[in-house]
Amino acid sequence: MKRIKVILTVFIVVIAAMASAQETVKIKEGQTLLYKINEYDGPVDQTVTLTSLASPMKISWNKKNKYDDKGTFLILKAALESAINIIFSFPINSNDDELSDVLPGFIVSKKMFNDLKSNKKTKIRVGCELKADDMTLKSEQPMYIIINGKKTIVNTLNVTWGTFGDEMWILDNADYPIIVKVSAISKYELTEIK
């Protein structure tokens, strides 16, 4: 019995240390997000650079695959505020494509984030699906990301949706709810912010 108490105490201390060590991630103009993406022909790197955070937000992206796909998006304020449509695969070679009601698969809208924080649920529509699915907050989880060269613990919202148990981890940041990891038809993970 005494051994169980010691183990529980150690476990609680470790969890408390992790929670206190978590940092609030400050998203800034000019930062680059590095994602590892599992594609059909193997893993590839994709960068998303936050060129401008002013409205409209401008991002440039580059998928380091054999085609060297790249492009830019202008994400309008309406999409950042309330869109529930997310595209996980970026179109080939976009050039300042304006997104007014859909978000590229690196961020969720403030509405989705706030709904998850306050109601533990929201709606999501992935790609070209006609029907929106219920997305539910499963838990809050610490995850590691390299930020400016330093391995850092950040808090994320782990959410699920769909009939196949798709999962996503969203950075706990109300201003910029960046997608940290996706395990769905697309699988990718944010590994570094620099």
Image (spheres, helix red, strand yellow):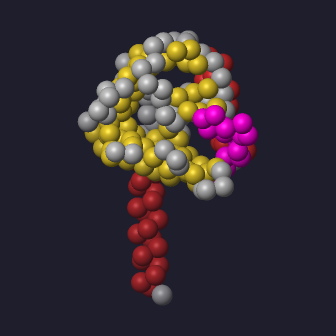
Task: Locate residue 139, reporting x and y percent.
Answer: 58, 54
Which picture quadrant has residue 2?
bottom left
Residue 126: say if magenta.
Answer: yes
Task: Tell which residue pokes out farthest to the bottom in this image.
Answer: 1
Q: Residue at x 38, y 22 (%)?
A: 70
Q: Residue at x 31, y 34 (%)?
A: 65
Residue 66, can we see it?
yes
Q: Is residue 30 above or below residue 65?
A: above
Q: Is residue 73 above or below residue 160?
A: above
In this orientation, which residue lies closer to the viewer: 17 or 194?
A: 194
Q: Residue at x 46, y 50 (%)?
A: 142
Image quadrant occupied by the C terminus: top left
Taking 47 as reference, is 15 left or right?
A: right
Task: Locate residue 57, reporting x and y percent.
Answer: 51, 16
In this orientation, which residue lies closer to the viewer: 135 or 157?
A: 135
Give the main secondary structure, helix, strand or loop, of the magenta stretch.
Answer: strand
Task: Locate residue 147, reporting x and y percent.
Answer: 33, 35
Residue 69: say if magenta.
Answer: no
Q: Residue at x 43, y 63 (%)?
A: 13
Residue 53, can we see it?
no
Which picture quadrant has residue 127?
top right
How many numbered circles does the render carry? Answer: 0
Give, as a single range, the part of the protein colored magenta. 121-138
Task: Locate residue 49, reporting x and y percent.
Answer: 38, 23
Q: Is residue 173 above or below residue 121?
A: above
Which picture quadrant has residue 98?
top right
In this orientation, which residue lies closer to the viewer: 103 or 21?
A: 103
